[in-house]
Image: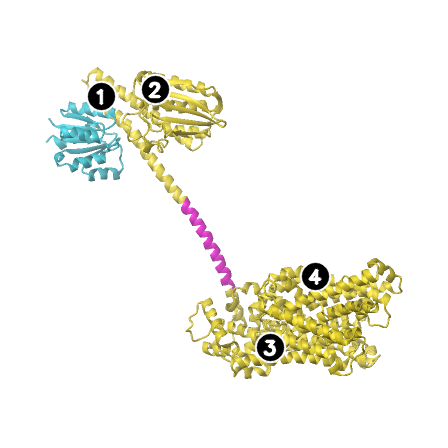
């Protein structure tokens, strides 16, 4: 394929990416750009050219060990989510813009540690970027069929590198606040993640199902070859240990590689997106690895052994004349290179500017300048870093023309990056880890890595069979770089990883225990380690003592954020903590808040330097810091408990109030009842006493009158007794203590018994009782009780009808579910205003001017309780105007 | 002959009182509640009214109010005779202008003494 065609395609592809980037930047809030899928896919920046080409290469030469790089992240992801949630929350709160920022924040915003982390990252990633460019260059040459260009200016890779630098500079440095999200850039990364996967799957399917008859076919053919066993299985225990270490290595990489930290933490727009990422990303990695081994085998079977196995993916279609497929493979590779280079360059440039250049030497210049110029300067530093990194990497590759496979350079980068792991992970969970220990650990670990991996590696390139490797320095076998202290069963990368980690972790632990950090370090350590309990404290969790003026801090902020943003941020701050904006002196919260505000723009360490240049800080002792933090924590816990308790108390007091109200009402009813009972009892008693007194004193009373008085006494005594019985009865019924003796009875029989009972009364008043419309119905009830109800109703009627023409009529009415007993009379009826009260105890109508024979006023109340105990009801028919009509309803 | 009006809705009590006071030489009138009492008082102004509190239609409190509001009944004494025996009830009755307050059950002899004391002088 002609070079110019390929160049045209590349230019077209890059223009498309630019267009997508611009489009997404403008729609950063739309659901297309801001969604968990974009986040999950952007994580796949992990799959660089190393994945795209290198894993086939390693599968072809060393078998399944290529899988470790992907198994690490897959296994680690559930854990990853847990730890990451915390990291993301802390990072958002403190405007962290890079891994260097994060680590320096944890160790008290020390600029030295931020710088050290930055240097380690640059050392690790710079050759890695060079390697990506090498992959582009080499695949370009393979595709175009030309040999390597002699001049830089005719080398298309150079132009690609320049375009990438422009791309990063354009989309990555729009604002000075590096902790702000870059939606355009991240969206293109996500798009590229889709493209590279799709393209890789296309070639996988092509190789497996077009060139071969599926996976079994390839397997059958390759297993016939010599030395196959070595490629598909683990030969021994050493290989298994190797696997284990490699998985750990890639697990660290997914946290610590600057580009991974950039996409997963800095560019995270919502913590909830982690959830989707937790399954999409592993699935992505699995899909990416489905065809790797088959492509590797196919390459071994179909291609000449002299070709570089890294590029089997590209050679295979080209060897079969499928140039278009080759172009697709090339574009997929280019995609993975672009996203890796872009994000790495962005992350590194932020780190270089915020953690290296600004805190060392630039801070003073920035301090004296205006916001516009400062912003421009910071952006320029970052843009320069981007260009130096990418173009520098290009020249690094051209000049050293490293004869190394993609895979090994990638692994060296991993081992170097892994040196940050102890400071990062242990620091997350152990508040004693100190800055000096972190620095020592990183430096010692890196030196060990250099000695056991980088040094022999480089030596090997220049001097074959160097005595350093075979005999050790000065012939000391124990110091052989690849077999340090006689450990000779591990391959170089695992070996270097093992020893560097041993030294790194030991240094970290020993120094942490030996030397405590200062109070500031410890303050931040507590904030990070106990992020969950200090989350709500925010500014309060920061312990600071000294003298500072708001106006000074304000000036410092304006220098970076500008007048408008500063005012807005401070207003928010004042409102949040309810502070008077006129307050002249700044407190710890404002100092901490201002540091956080600046961190995004100039990094954590520089922000600390910046703020401490305008405030007079007094050191606080470590025990004091811990005490204050503990108190803060306790205050929050106590507050929460108090809140809960007061809530509980309120609920209890509400319940008490209700219960009390009910009691008061009950009490009132009881008083009223007792009052009435007393009154009702006193009346006949008074009558008996008066009559007896007269009889006792008056000996010459006529016999007739005497008899009359005695008769009154007997009647009143009866009335008293009946009253007492009724009161007890009613209380028993209303408390539900009375058990009904329910049996089957005939309503008709019971009614007849009731009529017989009042017969004398009716006869005396010449009242007619008509029971002809009664049907024979059998029901379950307590006959004595129902008889009591009927008797009460009948005698009430007799009482209220006029004598001689009084008529009482009782009839039944049946429905499907009920039996109605209706008692009608032609008496004077019940006044409308009394109807709702007549079933209350002791209610006697005001209009009642005839004395009841029994006079208890409790008959209807008792009747109501009896009927209700039979699950029926008793009521007055309000529409009956010719007298009174009572309706007793039984459930059938 | 001094006139006594007995206002009560309990016929048995009324019967005892009527007998006892007639025997003491009083002229006795009977009413079963406040409204009946006022009808009677239009005709015969009593020297003393024995008044129950709890009665149908017009109760004792209302009745004494009407008695005290009518200058024609100015010289009529009032004795409450009621089952309501709480201090508050007694106080209320006296405040309304009653001369005595007897609670039921009561001693007929003491009631006669009180009546004698009030109107026989």
- Judging depth in this view, the residue of B62 and A423 nearest the camera is B62
Tell me where the magenta segment starts and ends, as one range. A633-658
Q: Position of residue A190 (x, y in %)?
A: 66, 66
Secondary structure beneath dot 3 equals: helix
Please indicate whether residue A854 sits to the left or right of residue A219 in the image.
Answer: left
Residue A282, disc:
4
Q: Earlier in the sequence, mark 4 or mark 1?
A: 4
CA gap, disc 2 and disc 1: 41 Å
Does A636 lie within the magenta span? yes
Location of residue A482 by image quarter:
bottom right
- Judging depth in this view, the residue of A623 and B49 nearest the camera is B49
Q: What chain does badge 1 belong to? A: A
> Do marks 3 and 1 share a chain?
yes
Residue A807, disc:
2
Q: Earlier in the sequence, mark 4 or mark 3?
A: 4
Query: Do callouts 2 and 1 mark residues in contact (Cβ within 8 Å)?
Result: no
Q: Residue at the location (70% across, 62% down)?
A: A284
Q: What chain does badge 4 belong to? A: A
The residue under label 3 is A354
> Do marks 4 and 2 share a chain?
yes
Question: How many other residues sit within 10 Å of disc 2, few (<14), some (14-19) or many (≥20)?
Answer: many
Residue A695, disc:
1
Q: Position of residue A696 (x, y in %)?
A: 22, 22
């Amino acid at each position: 394929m002609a070079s110019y065609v390929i160049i045209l395609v590349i230019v077209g592809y890059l223009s498309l990416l630019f267009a997508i980037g611009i489009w997404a930047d403008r729609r950063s809030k739309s659901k297309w750009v801001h969604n968990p899928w974009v986040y999950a896919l952007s994580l796949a920046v992990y799959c660089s050219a190393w994945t795209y080409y290198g894993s086939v290469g390693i599968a072809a030469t060393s078998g399944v060990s290529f899988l470790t790089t992907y198994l690490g992240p897959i296994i680690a992801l559930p854990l990853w989510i847990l730890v990451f949630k915390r990291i993301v929350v802390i990072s958002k709160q403190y405007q962290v813009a890079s891994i260097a920022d994060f680590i320096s924040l944890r160790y008290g915003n020390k600029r030295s540690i931020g710088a050290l982390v930055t240097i380690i990252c640059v050392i690790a990633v710079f050759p890695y970027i060079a390697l990506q460019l090498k992959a582009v260059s080499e695949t370009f040459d393979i595709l175009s069929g030309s040999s390597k260009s002699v001049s830089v200016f005719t080398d298309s890779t150079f132009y690609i590198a320049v375009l990438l630098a422009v791309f990063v500079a354009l989309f990555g440095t729009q604002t000075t606040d590096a902790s702000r999200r870059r939606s355009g850039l991240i969206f293109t990364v996500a798009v590229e993640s889709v493209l590279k996967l799709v393209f890789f799957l296309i070639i996988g399917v092509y190789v497996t199902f077009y060139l071969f008859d599926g996976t079994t076919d390839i397997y059958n053919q390759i297993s016939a070859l010599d030395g196959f066993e070595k490629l598909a299985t683990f030969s021994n225990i050493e290989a298994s240990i190797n696997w284990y270490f490699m998985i750990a290595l890639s697990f660290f990489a997914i946290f610590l590689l600057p580009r991974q930290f950039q996409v997963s933490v800095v560019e995270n727009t919502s913590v909830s997106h982690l959830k989707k990422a937790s399954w999409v990303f592993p699935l992505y990695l699995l899909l990416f690895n489905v065809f790797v081994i088959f492509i590797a085998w196919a390459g071994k079977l179909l291609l000449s052994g002299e070709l570089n196995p890294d590029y089997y993916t590209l050679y295979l279609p080209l060897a079969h004349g499928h140039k278009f497929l080759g172009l697709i493979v090339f574009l997929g590779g280019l995609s993975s290179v672009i996203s890796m280079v872009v994000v790495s360059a962005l992350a590194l440039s932020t780190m270089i500017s915020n953690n290296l250049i600004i805190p060392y030497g630039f801070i003073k210049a920035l301090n004296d300048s205006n916001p516009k110029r400062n912003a421009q300067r910071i952006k320029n530093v970052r843009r320069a870093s981007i260009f130096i990194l990418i173009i520098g990497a290009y020249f690094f590759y051209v000049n050293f023309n490293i004869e190394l496979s993609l895979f090994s350079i990638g692994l060296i980068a991993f081992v170097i990056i892994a040196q940050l792991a102890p400071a990062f992970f242990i620091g997350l969970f152990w508040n004693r880890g100190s800055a000096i220990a972190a620095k020592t650990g990183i430096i010692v670990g890196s030196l060990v890595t250099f000695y056991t991996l980088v040094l022999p590696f480089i030596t090997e390139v220049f001097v074959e069979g160097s005595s350093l490797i075979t005999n050790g320095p000065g012939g000391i076998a124990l110091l052989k770089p690849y077999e340090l202290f006689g450990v000779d069963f591990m391959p170089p990368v695992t070996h270097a990883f093992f020893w560097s980690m041993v030294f790194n972790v030991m240094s970290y632990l020993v120094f942490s225990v030996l030397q405590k950090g200062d109070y500031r370090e410890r303050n931040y350590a507590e904030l990070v380690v106990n992020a969950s309990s200090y989350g709500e404290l925010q500014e309060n969790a920061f312990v600071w003592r000294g003298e500072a003026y708001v106006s000074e801090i304000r000036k410092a902020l304006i220098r970076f954020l500008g007048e408008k943003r500063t005012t807005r941020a401070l207003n928010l701050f004042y409102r949040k903590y309810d502070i008077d904006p006129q307050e002249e002196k700044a407190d710890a919260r404002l100092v901490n808040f201002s540091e956080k505000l600046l961190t995004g723009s100039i990094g954590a360490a520089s922000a600390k330097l910046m703020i401490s240049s305008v405030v007079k800080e007094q050191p606080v002792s470590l025990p004091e810091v811990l005490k204050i933090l503990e108190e803060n924590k306790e205050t929050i816990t106590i507050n929460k408990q108090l809140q809960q308790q007061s809530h509980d108390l309120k609920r209890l007091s509400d319940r008490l109030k209700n219960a009390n109200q009910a009691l008061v009402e009950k009490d009132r009813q009881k008083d009223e009842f007792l009052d009435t009972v007393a009154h009702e009892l006193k009346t006949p008693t008074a009558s008996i006493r008066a009559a007896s007194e007269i009889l006792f004193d008056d000996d010459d009373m006529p016999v007739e009158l005497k008899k009359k008085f005695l008769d009154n006494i007997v009647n009143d005594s009866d009335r008293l007794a009946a009253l007492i019985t009724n009161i007890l009865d009613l209380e028993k019924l209303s408390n539900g203590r009375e058990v009904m003796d329910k049996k089957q009875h005939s309503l008709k029989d019971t009614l007849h018994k009731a009529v017989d009972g009042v017969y004398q009364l009716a006869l005396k008043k010449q009242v007619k009782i008509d029971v002809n419309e009664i049907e024979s119905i059998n029901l379950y009830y307590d006959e004595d009780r129902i008889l009591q109800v009927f008797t009460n109703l009948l005698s009430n009627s007799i009482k209220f009808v006029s004598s001689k023409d009084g008529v009482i009529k009782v009839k039944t009415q049946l429905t499907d579910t009920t039996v109605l007993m209706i008692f009608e009379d032609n008496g004077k009826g019940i006044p409308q205003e009394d109807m709702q009260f007549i079933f209350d105890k002791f209610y006697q109508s005001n209009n009642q001017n005839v004395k009841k024979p029994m006079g208890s006023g409790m008959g209807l109340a008792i009747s109501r309780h009896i009927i209700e105990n039979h699950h029926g009801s008793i009521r007055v028919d309000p529409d009956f105007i010719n007298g009174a009509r009572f309706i007793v309803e039984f459930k059938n | 002959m001094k006139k006594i009006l007995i206002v009560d809705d309990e016929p048995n009590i009324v019967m005892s009182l009527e007998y006892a006071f007639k025997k003491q030489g009083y002229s006795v009138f009977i009413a079963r509640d406040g409204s009946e009492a006022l009808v009677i008082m239009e005709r015969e102004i009593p020297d003393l009214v024995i008044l129950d509190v709890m009665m149908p239609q017009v109760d004792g409190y209302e009745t004494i109010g009407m008695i005290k509001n009518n200058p024609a009944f100015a010289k009529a004494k009032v004795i409450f005779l009621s089952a309501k025996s709480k201090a508050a009830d007694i106080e209320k009755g006296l405040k309304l202008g009653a001369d005595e307050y007897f609670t039921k059950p009561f001693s007929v002899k003491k009631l006669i003494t009180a009546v004698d004391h009030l109107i026989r002088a």
